[in-house]
Image (cartoon, rainbow, N blue to C red):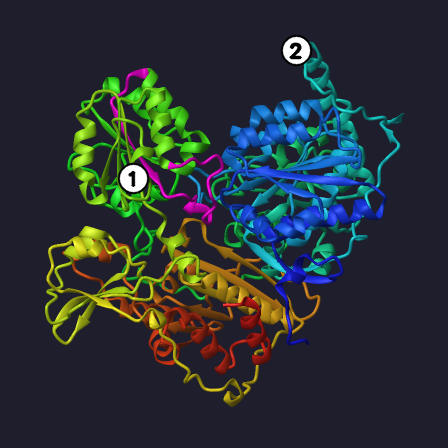
Amino acid sequence: MTTTYDPADRYAPDATRVLLSGIQALVRLPLDQHRVDTARGLSTATFITGYEGSPIGGYDLQLLQIGRLLEDHDVRFVPGVNEELAATSIWGTQTIPQMRSDLDGVIGFWYGKAPGVDRAGDAMRHGNYAGTHPNGGVVVLAGDDPASKSSTVPSASEGTLADRGIPVLAPADVQDVLDLGRHAIALSRYSGLWVGMKIATDIADAFEDCVIDLDRVDPVFPDDVDGSPWHREAPPTLMTPGGSVDREASAFGERRRAVLAYLAANRLDRVVVDTNEARLGIVAAGVAYQAMRESLRLLGLDDTALAGLGVRVMRLAAISPIEPGGITSFAEGLDEILVIEEKRPFVETQLRDILYNIERRPAITGALDPAGDPLVPIDGELTVARVLPALRKRLAAHGIETDTPTRTIIALDDPPARRVPFFCSGCPHNRSTVTPDGSLIGGGIGCHAMVVFTDDERRRAASLTQMGGEGAQWIGQEPFSEATHLFQNLGDGTYFHSGSLAIRAAISSGSHVTYKLLVNDVVAMTGGQQPAGTRPTPEIARQLLAEGVAAVLVCSDDTSRHPADAWPAGVDVWTRNRLEEAQERLRSVPGVTVLIYEAPCATEIRRDRRRGRRPQPTTRVVIHELVCEGCGDCGVVSNCLSLHPVMTEFGPRTRVDQASCNLDMSCLEGDCPAFVTVEVDPDTVTPSRSIVPPIEGIRDPEPPDLEDGYAILLAGIGGTGVLTANALLATAAFIDGHAVRGIDQTGLSQKAGPVVSHLRIVDGETPKGAGRTPPARADLLLGFDALVAADPNLLTAAGRHRTVAVVSTAATPTGTMVAHRDRKMPDLTAAPDLVARATREIIRVDAHEIAEQLAGDPATANVVLIGAAYQSGLLPLTKEAITAAIRANGV
């Protein structure tokens, strides 16, 4: 064990074992490829472009953090204005007529979520038909969100990519991202096709310790394809109408056959359990493979048991096209092949095609069983809990008895309230989304989409469109609607991506619509990136007027932000408190009008203050509890999560939570005499205390046993450091020399909604299993928020005779409680009791109060709870490793 850890080692060339997330593995991949090319005497560069979006929304942020390292490896990163244009840029890297004399080729990486794959389809088809450079190659990183956690619809990209002739590899874990990523580049170079990688949520959000060895992947390039010498041609510099037919034939003919030859030669698909007496075969790929293997373990079936019972198991690396030789060999002697895969039958259909003409054809089951009844769910995502019944049913059909996973069923009551995503404190959307009474509202993609979680009629959207379609739905609705006008929300990131075209369409159709364009300078939904192609607000106004918008009006939190002469003639600039007046005025103007609401993202302001980029305000807002009547008007006015309803000796009151307050000051606009502003010394804006006891005084408890691994479940509120807490524990385990695997489940929940993280710690090289905690298998539940921890869906991972919970008793109100003080407030203190009913033992800790007393900042409450778990002997970690992890985090 070492007590030092440097996060920068994750990208170091001489590292041998590193802790990586799925996103970080994607960052390391082009660096490693450049190192390999250089070692082989090949001079290559890399071009990365795409568009941010979950589940790979943090990819660009991670790339920007290592800008110098990218330069050292000749990696050029250019965020795309949208996915289609980014894909066209990638196409250009493979058809350079006059390449730099010092370069042998350029590798292209395109990234985007599944809707972006759809959008970029035409560009990808053109680029793939054209082909790749023999020393370049193109990899498409397709982010799939099967459960629609941060997307408008569930997604799976493999069918779309396959339709464009793009082969698809499916990593099953983070190590696979590195290994299959290298193969993807090699395959693209060899075959002349673009190659896709399916980066599902449970891959992007996962993390684990990975082996780093540049010789780990040594691609084999067959000289022959179907018995003929393989000579791949260079891509044409120009696609012509006549030549495109030939390119189509090549993409789906000889180049596709080259893909199959590569897959066969490199044996990427592996039979992981084999036996000559097999009757049943099980095939899976990607995250579905991990869920299947974990399910078999819960059923008491390890590799030895499976082989003895006549079961073969195959792990596919390539899900399109599937190499037929390996599947045909795998199917020999089988009565049935069970396919475990997400969404519609894709692998299953290919297996039927491959095996249809063999002499002894096994039955193929998957989405349906032999009787035609549903078997493997095709909706949502495949978790262990959803795979288990399908496996048990087909194993039983072959006379294979299985253990029943230990699970004590407890009838749990619903928690007293539900957390849903909500606007951050001080979010400008809290103001911009409010409309005059009786308005018809349209939603779209961005933080403003959280209006779908509210029952406030002034904000609730009647329709929600895909990105770039905002307002176009009204073109079809308006002629047949009793309503005569629509307010359409639109973020500036979407505006530059594609939303400006929707406005143009509305103008062309003669719609009567007012676009409410929020300009906050960042793509806040995916981490705070600056929108590609952004322009200053006065230029946006000028562009809109030039497009034919009937009127533009600006409401700003700072009317002096731009010089008065910067605005085009006829554009009024009002203060933000005239928002309703501005909307009334614009909807009275026929045609398309635009209200630009200019205010920076509150979360970015908070980050900038913490990093010293903005000054800390010296004015604080407090509420005098003797004057406050607990009416909640301030919450109605500001819709701010920092206004906490509390019970005092004087009855129900409201208190400003200073730790989360972003100092937006909108709460002062209510008609309330209880608010008091206080001027503080700027040097003491963030109080700190130094009475924390020395760590040397903490006893070393007996750690839990790691023989069967140790599963930790973390539950809390988005934006409060749950992911950081999981990263600290994982880093500490890594420092202690343990193997780790985990997943952070976030999606939209990062915006004050529920966040659940999973961590599995095992000794040495013991198989780690799936990233998520299986049903009833949690050893420790860290409830940073008791309300999230008490959710019945989460508690399915708890075992009545296994799990110990360490739960914070601090009661944090939900967004609904803030905005609707006229309703009866639920008793949040009952939430820990629900957790206690589902676990073996519960330890209750008022972590917020302890953090406030010790550090002067309740934001450290999560670390306090970790400390309580450690001192209770519930963490298989040393305090030296935990301390080193905290220091390495740098905060």
Residue, x 53% and y 32% (percent of image)? Answer: 83
Mark 2: few/some/many CA within 10 Å (<14, 14-19, 20+): few
Q: Earlier in the sequence, mark 1 or mark 2?
A: 2
Residue 363 is situated, as x and y percent measured from the top left of the image, at 66, 36
**Quarter of the view holding residue 237:** top right
Observer-nearest residue: 496 or 804?
496
Magenta segment: 509-536
Q: Quadrant of the N terminus?
A: bottom right
- Magenta stretch: includes residue 797: no
Residue 350 vertical placement versus 642 (above, below): above
Residue, x 41% and y 47% (percent of image)? Answer: 524
Amino acid type, callout 2: Pro
Which residue does the numbered mark 2 point to in the structure image? 241
Mark 1: few/some/many CA within 10 Å (<14, 14-19, 20+): many
Of tags 1 and 2, the one toward the viewer is 1
In the image, which disc is placed on residue 597?
Answer: 1
Left-right relation of 145 to 106: left
Residue 225 is situated, as x and y percent measured from the top left of the image, at 84, 28
Of all residues shown, which one is farthest toward the top?
242
Residue, x 24% and y 68% (percent of image)? Answer: 679
Residue 529 is situated, as x and y percent measured from the top left of the image, at 48, 46
Observer-nearest residue: 728 or 553?
553
Residue, x 13% and y 64% (percent of image)? Answer: 674
- Magenta stretch: includes residue 511: yes
Residue 441 is situated, as x and y percent measured from the top left of the image, at 25, 34
Helix, strand or loop under label 2: helix
Disc 1 and disc 2: Cα gap in Å?
46 Å
**Quarter of the view holding residue 657:** bottom left
